[in-house]
Amino acid sequence: MLPTPYLGRALALVGLIAAACGGATVAPSASPTTAASQAAATQAATAKPAQKLVIGFTESLTGAQNVTSKKQTEGIRLWVDDVTKAGGIKLKDGTVLLPEIKSYDDESKQDRVQALYTKLINDDKASLLLSPYSSNLVKTAAIVSEQNGKVMITAGGADDATMEQGFKNIYQVYTPASKYLTGAIDLMLKTDPTIKKIAIVNEKDSFSTSVAAAAKPYAESKGLQVVVSEGYESSTTDFAPFINKIVAASPDAIIGGGHFQDGTTFAKQLLEKKVAARFVALLVAPPEPTFADIGAAAEFIVGPSQWETQTKYSADSAKALNIPFYGPAGDVFVKAYQAKYNAPPSYHSAGGYAAGLTLQRALEEAGSTGTEAVRAALDKMDLLTFYGRIKFSTDAKLHGKQVGHEMVYVQWQRDSAGKLATQVVWPLEAKSADAKLRK
């Protein structure tokens, strides 16, 4: 059965089809026609024809971001499928919008993002925009979108810096980078209060640098000694120089990382070189289901996640917060995603779908595709979805920055059958298992 918000749209589409075929046929009845049925017939006869809504974005079919970008795009495409099956997005005046996505391969390159978002706006006439994946690419897309006065929902960018430019048209679904590893530090100290020394090693891109820059003072505020604090180039495949420095400093814990490729490589080399740190938390890579492909190197690694399949947000949760719940329940999303892609969704998948839901809700509330109306609806938005809470800052400098969504933390552990699986280990009220230290 379709979720309630979608059912009405499905019924609206039936009315449109009936009108297109020459009107509804009234079955014989002994009862007189009621005022309600007359009103329904009038509405069906005067319903506006469905309109195509072009939504543009780029995806990394190739290059360094291709794994996580693919997951994000799958989430976006599933959202489009669900909206289409439900009959489109229905506005207050009866207009029905049928989303049509236009996307290009950005090859994980900023210069291509700049050129392609310009093309999406000027040539493809995209009414609204979604973002590429990764903060560096999002930053470029945001500048182009803002310069052209286009609303863009960012699904794959957590960098604080992008959202501190005073942009008027950019809205961030992800929890900002400054909050990515602070919770991991809290988890670490809860799990082992004797930890005193940590190493911070991060990719030198904008997102990872922002995370590390926020994590260092937070760790120090907790009485921890940061014995290593260094960045590495995104192209790094041999982490031996960094690992040697880490071993020499003998930290109790390691935090940092960057994206999927460097994160998996770093984790493998930590195991190969038998680094003895008791706690390791890395960005981006651990929550991705394919992180398990590195086998024993994945075990006990912690990662911050925007969302996990075990995370349960519901109408009851929304009621407790006194905000509305919108869209499908988490288990409905997971089931639909697995049916379409024959794989479990990652938080990147959920983020893509959530970006679509955010845009959908804004259009419904705005009653228009106009930039001013959509922006006003986004500014007022405060709701709960299967992905979590969505609310944006309206402060002039921080406009559009995500202020409602919270991170969860996962750890790869072996189940009773010896198979690697992720468990939610923080926050405690959301945990599916207790965190474990590396052996």
Image: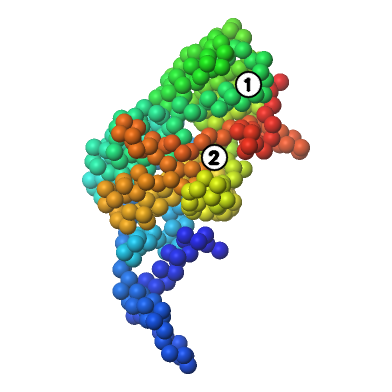
Q: Quadrant of residue 219?
A: top right
Q: CA distance from mark 2 to mark 1?
A: 22 Å
Q: Secondary structure at mark 2?
A: loop
Residue at horizontal 45%, vertical 56%? Answer: 81
Quarter-of-image position of residue 89: bottom left
Q: Give neighbour class at mark 2: few <14, some 14-19, many 20+ (Cα, 10 Å).
A: many
Q: Residue at x 55, y 31 (%)?
A: 304
> Foreground residue, 282 or 311?
311
Q: Is residue 372 left or right of residue 104?
A: left
Three-letter amino acid code at disc 1? Leu
C-beta proximity under 8 Å, tags 2 and 1:
no
Q: Is residue 181 above or below residue 40?
A: above
**How many marks overall?**
2
Q: Identify the amino acid type marked 2.
A: Trp
Q: Which residue is mark 2?
A: 307
Q: Nearer the viewer, residue 340 or 179?
A: 179
Tag in front: 2 or 1: 1
User: Relative to 423, is 64 on the left or the right?
Assistant: left
Instruction: Name the one closer to the observer, 253 or 364.
Output: 364
Residue at the image position 43 percent from the left and 64 percent from the top: 9
In the picture, the quarter occupied by the C terminus is top right
Q: Tell me where residue 315 appears, x and y as whole percent.
A: 55, 52
Which quarter of the rendering shows the N terminus?
bottom right
Tell me, for residue 172, which label it has, or none.
none
Q: Position of residue 131 (x, y in %)?
A: 37, 40
309 sits left or right of 111 in the view: right
Residue 395 x/y as whole percent = 33, 34
Residue tagged 1: 189
Q: Earlier in the sequence, mark 2 or mark 1?
A: 1
Instruction: Tell me the SS state at disc 1.
Output: helix
Residue 125 shows in the view: yes
Which residue of the protein is positioned furthest toward the top in this rendering? 248
